Image: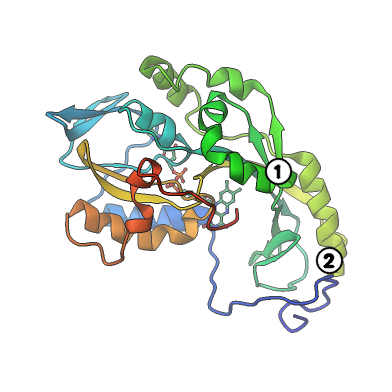
Amino acid sequence: MDAITPGNAFDCKGAIFTENDGQAEPTKVTAALARAAEGRGAEFLTHCAVFEVETTGGVASGVVTEHGVIRAPVVVCAGGAWSGRFLRTLGLKLPQMWIKGSVARTTAAPVISHTATWTGVAFRQRRDGTFNIATRSADHDLTLESVLNFPSFAGSFVRNKRDIKLNLNRLAFDLLGGSFSKSALTKELTTHRILDPEPNHKVLNHVLSELRRLLPDTAAVEIERKWAGYVDMAPDMLPTLDALDQPSGLVLATGFSGHGFGMGPIVGRLISELILRSKPSLDLHAFRFSRYSDGTKLTPHSVV
Ligand SMILES: Cc1cc2nc3c(=O)[nH]c(=O)nc-3n(C[C@H](O)[C@H](O)[C@H](O)COP(=O)(O)OP(=O)(O)OC[C@H]3O[C@@H](n4cnc5c(N)ncnc54)[C@H](O)[C@@H]3O)c2cc1C
């Protein structure tokens, strides 16, 4: 541990080190992948909400967007935290719980370690010496969906209740009707075009003091930036990767439960195989949509 993170004051008795783990900057990676896709003919429309999937005779035939209809032989639903609410407009039940994770960026410190580490707090030192820091405790901002989905998440909530803080704030009122009415969802999709929730300042201040304690060489760093995002949690913490029969032509790639960035490349390949209706190169049975209705016992397979 001292060779990987010199000068640490970790209070753990052992650790697991995965040498072939990687890390990447999400803003750079996603932009680079988009540019690469554009180079191969993909077209991106930003600030363009999809209001509904259009079906013709039970087959997905396109999407209705705020700028008009786009016809397509296959539609992929990859709406992140919105997927559950969106699919309800088609009568499909995908249980999702929004869990808010807060992150802070510190000012720069001398290079200590480039290994992403989780020891009570999670930290990753970036190339410029700044740290991204977070912790496992998270928030759940209550909405009507919390109530509708509670039965699917009760077990998971009880197990993790020490780490999840429930909040009643504006979101509950802002997202009141969209779970039931298409017109309300339409409004919510444009009003909350980019979900940018308030981070948990108290938790992040605690994480900073823990970082300074665990890595004494960071004693002088301060928080430079804070942000938060909603993780689209599934009851079993597994994504849904499936081509549906009803409506056929609709492919689901969602529910990444806090691990979707790392899974991106392999998921991209598997979804392209589903779109081309070829046999997926991995067995996707565990990720089928029907597990939510075929009596499968859904127990969490992972942690956030
Ligand atoms: C704080 C935090 C830390 C994380 N850390 C990690 C990590 O270390 N490693 C990791 O692997 N993962 C991590 N994740 C999770 C990762 O960011 C997600 O799993 C991943 O972004 C999910 O990708 P996605 O494409 O399914 O959804 P998103 O990235 O949310 O993309 C969905 C997009 O669809 C858009 N959209 C939704 N509905 C509509 C609509 N109707 N019309 C038009 N557009 C729509 C949304 O605006 C959004 O841009 C973290 C998440 C958070 C919040």
**Disc on the earlier residue, 2 or 1:** 1
Q: Residue furthest front?
A: 295
Q: Which mark is residue 161?
A: 1
Q: Amino acid at mark 1?
A: Lys
User: In the rendered image, which quarter is residue 220 located in?
Assistant: bottom right
**Disc 2 marks which residue?**
214
Residue depicted at x 71% and y 73%: 113
User: In the rendered image, which quarter is residue 59 located in?
Assistant: top left
Q: Left or right: 139 with respect to 240?
A: right
User: In the rendered image, which quarter is residue 133 located in?
Assistant: bottom right
- Other-residue count near label 2 (Cα within 10 Å), few / some / many at <14 / 14–19 / ≥20: some
Q: Is residue 266 above or below residue 164?
A: below
Between 49 and 99, the one lying in front of the other is 99
Q: Is residue 69 above or below residue 30?
A: above
Between 192 and 109, the one lying in front of the other is 192
Q: Can residue 22 be spotted in the picture?
A: yes
Secondary structure beneath label 1: helix
Q: Residue furthest bottom?
A: 3
Q: Amino acid at mark 2?
A: Leu
Q: Residue 9 location, x and y as percent? A: 86, 72
Q: Is mark 1 within 8 Å of ligand 1?
A: no
Q: Is residue 176 above or below residue 49?
A: above
- The Cα–Cα distance between marks 2 and 1, rounded to whole angstroms, is 26 Å
Q: Residue 64 location, x and y as percent? A: 26, 26
Q: Is mark 2 within 8 Å of ligand 1?
A: no
Q: Residue 189 location, x and y as percent? A: 44, 26
Residue depicted at x 51% and y 45%: 235
Residue depicted at x 71% and y 80%: 4
Q: Residue 288 location, x and y as percent? A: 34, 50
Q: Which mark is in front, 2 or 1?
A: 1
